[in-house]
Image: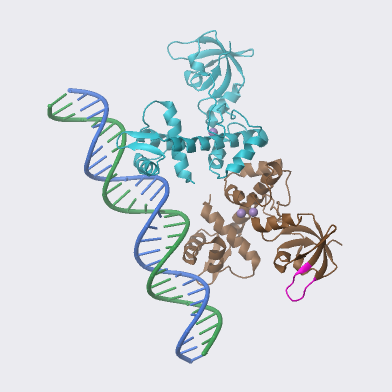
Chain colours: A brown, B cyan, C blue, D green
Amino acid sequence: MFTLAEENYLKAIFHLEHESAGDVSTNAIAESMDTKPSSVTDMIQKLAEKKLLVYKRYKGAQLSDTGRKVAINVIRKHRLWEVFLVEKLNFHWDEVHEIAEQLEHIQSEELITRLDKFLGSPDFDPHGDPIPDKHGVLKRTEKKLLSEIEKNQKGVCVGVKESSAEFLQYLDKKKISIGTKIKVLGKEFFDGSMIIQIGNDQFFISNKIAENLYVQTQE
Amino acid sequence: MFTLAEENYLKAIFHLEHESAGDVSTNAIAESMDTKPSSVTDMIQKLAEKKLLVYKRYKGAQLSDTGRKVAINVIRKHRLWEVFLVEKLNFHWDEVHEIAEQLEHIQSEELITRLDKFLGSPDFDPHGDPIPDKHGVLKRTEKKLLSEIEKNQKGVCVGVKESSAEFLQYLDKKKISIGTKIKVLGKEFFDGSMIIQIGNDQFFISNKIAENLYVQTQE
DNA sequence: TTTTATTTTTAGACAAGACTAAAATAAATC
DNA sequence: GATTTATTTTAGTCTTGTCTAAAAATAAAA
Ligand SMILES: [Mn+2]
Ligand SMILES: [Mn+2]
Ligand SMILES: [Mn+2]
Ligand SMILES: [Mn+2]
């Protein structure tokens, strides 16, 4: 139905729409897709032709309902495949993204329906990201960045904002994974760094780490 | 490493090399890939540049060792994915080929290694075709076409030559699948049609059917 | 309100892969 | 051996998706 390139653009725009309000700029798309602004202009004009997004010259793009549906379906596939890779093939969570980038473009509704069932209709992918259901509905859960919680508060890790292999490997080294309980012992006002406690271990983390970890403050 | 188009050409040429001896002709490739001879010429010239095959103008193509290795690896992936779709996702054998055509191009050695292990290192795909091992070695088994065996001989179905959905659905209707025991009760010299027995059922099959069913005559 | 800087778009080119139409070569037939 | 036919290749064009360089529009600064 749609080309690989089209699907990737729609997906990127979808993510960007959730990062900041208003129209998505040409430059933002170009940066997030590691391509040139002129290429982006070309493509969004084509996507606008196809009614997958609304585009006004010099003002940016905004997904249409159908465009959003396509994007969400790609994301659904991406995340289901990631679950498959981790749960069934025992890949580690830092190894699956690249492969899922390819698998997300396999065209077959039936395949995804069956894969979903095979995996037990998971609600979250290995990085804690919600998996849209068949109709594109995303379970929104209450979660904050670790950087947003205060001294002496506790939270349980429910996801990562960034999911680069480097970051995930850092978390492994620190024994942080989905489900890990974290208590903030101290928070430095100046640079946002923290002292946290996990189990009996206490250690320092930088603001960059705290800004990429999602936690749920349970109570 | 290689593009989707390149992989498909190499795979097609590999199959054609096994269908008849000598160089593979431009027209044969074009027909098997449902494309035009001029397009084939373009591509095999590029593949020759890349040393994936040997090409002499007006004489046809012949895979090089590296070209053959690439082709076999694609076939390995195709067949392993077909096993996955049937064994794990409960697809029927007539539904998997199209999806495997896409999955066979996913690039990740590790993925295939793990998929193979997950599936228990199967030797054959759902259509009875052998799955090359990691090193590209194909288990050659003794099998003949049903059309080649004589009256009163018995055989067990071990594979299909053609694997179109239509043919596979015909086989289903006749309750023929891998492992089915077949006895040839009669054979018409004129058109090669047969009367066969399966279990307690006896029925007529045309030569076209007999020429697309592989059997092993056990004795 | 000009001037300057940034963002975005256009124009033109390129690579991959496909196609049509025409030319070249090989195979078949007389 | 000459001629007709079939196969294969070349030449030129098209689409998709990318790029660079230049122009146009917008935003920021003076
Ligand atoms: Mn991912
Ligand atoms: Mn992805
Ligand atoms: Mn197949
Ligand atoms: Mn295939």
Query: Overall secondary structure of the magenta stretch?
Result: loop
Image position of B50 with respect to A187: above or below: above
The answer to whether A19 appears left or right of B22 in the picture is: right
Q: Nearer the viewer, residue A13 or A154?
A: A154
Q: Is residue A156 above or below residue B48?
A: below
Which residue is most to the right?
A: A219
Q: Which residues are magenta?
A: A187-194
Q: Position of residue B88 (x, y in %)?
A: 67, 36
Q: Quadrant of residue D19?
A: bottom left
Q: How many marks?
A: 0
Task: Give x and y (percent) for residue B199.
Answer: 64, 14
Using residue B27 as the reference point, say whether residue A34 is left or right of it: right
Residue A8 shows in the view: yes
Residue drawn at the location 55% of the way across and 61% of the way down: A33
Judge whether A78 appears above or below A114 on screen: below
Residue A142 visible in rendering:
no
Q: Residue at x 46, y 35 (%)?
A: B68
Q: Is residue B53 magenta?
A: no
